[in-house]
Image: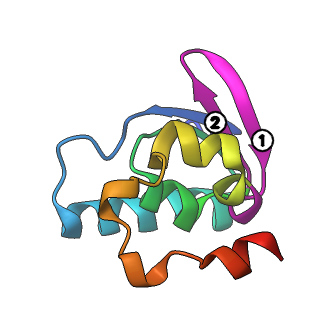
Amino acid sequence: MALEPQLILLDEPMAGMNFEEKEDMARYIVDLNEEFGMTVMMIEHDMGVVMDISHRVMVLDFGRKIAEGDPAAVLADPHVKRAYLGEEDEALVDPDDRPTVRESAA
């Protein structure tokens, strides 16, 4: 940080950290951006951290870009849901929550 870079690249900065350490690192990353005006580009698999501190997100699935934009839009993207959050498992759906035949036809 002594050289005051305009851009900093981080590869899995939260790897191996517990919850408190992740909070501290997230605050530090946000400070780099807000207080020092640094652009921070990071590769991170902790979706909670990514969505909490990012202004813009790009999601790759096996090296192919499947979504890009603000965190809320990316999280809502059906391709991202399938790739990272998984499909809904029919075996785990409560039978009371399934639509009736009448609701399905409407």
Percent across and percent down for residue 66 are: 72, 31
Q: List the single residue furthest toward the bottom.
A: 96
Is residue 69 visible to us here?
Answer: yes
Q: Which mark is residue 59?
A: 2
Name the residue nearer the viewer: 86 or 21.
86
Across and down, in percent, residue 21 comes to 22, 62
Whether 58 is among the magenta residues is yes
Residue carrying label 1: 68
- Residue 2 at least partly seen: no
30 shown above or below 94: above
Disc 1 element: strand
The question of residue 25 being in magenta is answered with: no
Question: Are dots 1 and 2 in contact, CB under 8 Å?
Answer: yes
Magenta stretch: dominant SS?
Answer: strand
Which residue is depicted at the point 60% across and 79% down? 100
Disc 1 and disc 2: Cα gap in Å? 6 Å
Residue density around tag 2, few if under 14, some if 14–19, many if 20 or more, within 10 Å: many
Viewed as shown, does residue 77 lie left or right of 31? right
Residue type highlighted by circle 1: Glu
> Looking at the picture, does residue 96 appear above or below residue 105?
below
Residue 32 placement (x, y as % from top left): 56, 57
Residue at 31%, 47% (x, y): give it: 14
Q: Tell me if residue 101 comes above or below residue 71 in the rendering.
A: below
Say which residue appears at 66% left-offset and 66% top-offset: 34
Q: Amino acid at mark 2?
A: Val
Query: What residue is drawn where x is 40% and y is 56%?
Result: 90
Which of the two labelled residues, at mark 1 and mark 2, occupies the earlier sequence position?
2
* In the foreground, 102 or 46: 102
Part of the protein shown in magenta? 56-73
The C terminus - image quarter: bottom right
Local crowd size for mark 1, using a 10 Å CA cut-off: few (<14), some (14–19), many (≥20): some
